[in-house]
Every structure is written in structure tokens, then in C-alpha cells.
Amino acid sequence: MRIRLERSTAKYDTTTANLQLALSQASGFAVTGDTSTLHAGSYGAYAANAFYIQFVDKTYNPNVPSVKYHLEGIYNYAYNGSNLLIYVNYADTLSLQYHFTKTN
């Protein structure tokens, strides 16, 4: 989910995409699902500690402008054994929030 402050109206708008996240200590991460508009399909490495999770997206190139978001960088996260929330806030203008439910 992307929550963004629309400067012209001073209101927040929300956009969502149905994504799947696969995490494996051996092979890294992969994002699949509805990657047609808001978020890019991607894969790469990840590492986590008790508070943060960092993704290194092999498909992300910071030198090439992209209209889609990538799971790239350091995020806060919370996991309760079934639900994984990954999020990052950029000041008061943009929040990216990922809500995943464990399926196996």
C-alpha cells in the first residue's frame, strides 16, 4: 500500500497492489503478484535483525528513473508468526506499507 500526501489537495491518497513475497535464507527474496502498475516484480538478498529488514533488489537501478516502487533499502518490520508488516515512512508525504500473511 502506498499512502501519499497529494500536495494540490493537502489530502492523503492510498493505492494498493496485491503482492506475494517469498523469503528464503538460501535464495533471498522475490516479489510477485500484481506488478503491473504500482510495484515492480523483483528479487535479491535480504537480512534482518530484531527491528529492521534490509532488501538489496537485484532489479533496482538507482540511475534509471522508475515509475514503480522496488523493495529496496531498510524497512521497519513486525512479525507475529503469521503476519508480516514491512513499512517505511518518508517524512509526512509518503508511506509504503506491506502486509503479508504466511501461507505455508
Image: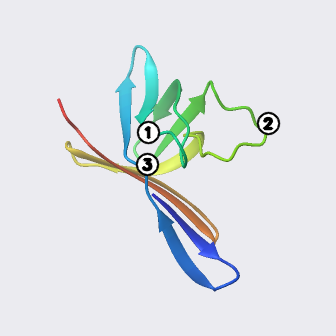
| Amino acid type, callout 1 | Asn
Q: Position of residue 35 (x, y in %)?
A: 49, 39
* Residue lying farthest to the top in this orientation: 26
Which numbered disc, 1 or 2, marks the residue that appears first in the sequence?
A: 1
Q: What residue is shown at x 52% (from left), y 32% (from top)?
A: 41
Inspect this view and state whether residue 22 appears: yes
* Mark 1 touches mark 3? (CB < 8 Å): yes
Q: Which residue is more in the foreground, 81 or 18?
A: 18
| Residue 89, placed above or below residue 12 | above
Inspect this view and state whether residue 92 appears: no
According to the image, label 2 marks what residue? 64
Between the residue at mark 1 and the residue at mark 2, the CA separation in whole angstroms equals: 30 Å
Q: Position of residue 89 (x, y in %)?
A: 56, 62
Between the residue at mark 1 and the residue at mark 3, the CA separation in whole angstroms equals: 6 Å
**Colour setup of the view:** rainbow
Q: What residue is shown at x 52% (from left), y 48% (from top)?
A: 75
Left or right: residue 71 compared with residue 24: right
Question: Callout 2 environment at 10 Å: few (<14), some (14 to 19), or many (20+)?
Answer: few
| Amino acid type, callout 3 | Phe
* Mark 2 touches mark 3? (CB < 8 Å): no
According to the image, label 3 marks what residue? 51
Left or right: residue 101 compared with residue 1: left
Q: What residue is shown at x 64% (from left), y 85% (from top)?
A: 9
Q: Judging from the image, what secondary structure is the residue with disc 1 in?
A: loop
| Amino acid type, callout 2 | Val
